[in-house]
Image (tube, rainbow, N blue to C red):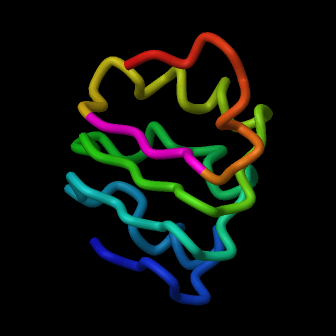
Amino acid sequence: VDLWGTQVTGDGLAALEGSRVRWLRLGGTRVDDTAFASLDSFPSLHILELTSTGVTPAFLPHLARVAPKLQRLAIDGTKAESEAGVEL
């Protein structure tokens, strides 16, 4: 699902929860940490692009639950980018 540059927020992502989305492109959106409280509700997610969004290091614990399934994560241009120890 390519939502790059749209006005989508965490509320908009809620409509996708439980779906078989494998690729979620959210760069340049209004998505922030609160959007990912239920990140594990995307069981098929393999690629997550969050470039230039409002995610911070507070997002990382949510990420830990799905990190083993992710093949690619893009958090460049976010406050979470500078957090040490993020490896996939």
Total tally of numbered discs in the picture: 0
Q: Is residue 70 left or right of residue 5?
A: left
Residue at the image position 65 percent from the left and 66 percent from the top: 31
Could you say which is closer to the camera, residue 19 or residue 77? Answer: 77
Residue at the image position 27 percent from the left and 26 percent from the top: 69
Q: Position of residue 22 (x, y in %)?
A: 21, 52
Q: Is residue 35 above or below residue 56?
A: below
Using the rendered view, name the quadrant where residue 29 is placed: bottom right
Q: Main secondary structure of the magenta part?
A: strand
Q: Position of residue 82 (x, y in %)?
A: 72, 30
Q: Residue furthest top?
A: 85
Q: Is residue 14 left or right of residue 72?
A: right
- Work out which quarter of the rendered image holds the C terminus and state it: top left
Magenta stretch, residue numbers:
72-76
Using the rendered view, name the quadrant where residue 19 is placed: bottom left
- Work out which quarter of the rendered image holds the N terminus and state it: bottom left
User: Residue 74 colored magenta?
Assistant: yes
Could you say which is closer to the camera, residue 27 or residue 20? Answer: 27
Using the rendered view, name the quadrant where residue 43 is placed: top left
Q: Position of residue 53 (x, y in %)?
A: 65, 62
Residue at the image position 72 percent from the left and 24 percent from the top: 83
Q: Is residue 70 left or right of residue 7?
A: left
Q: Position of residue 73 (x, y in %)?
A: 40, 39
User: Residue 31 colored magenta?
Assistant: no
Residue at the image position 45 percent from the left and 37 percent from the top: 40
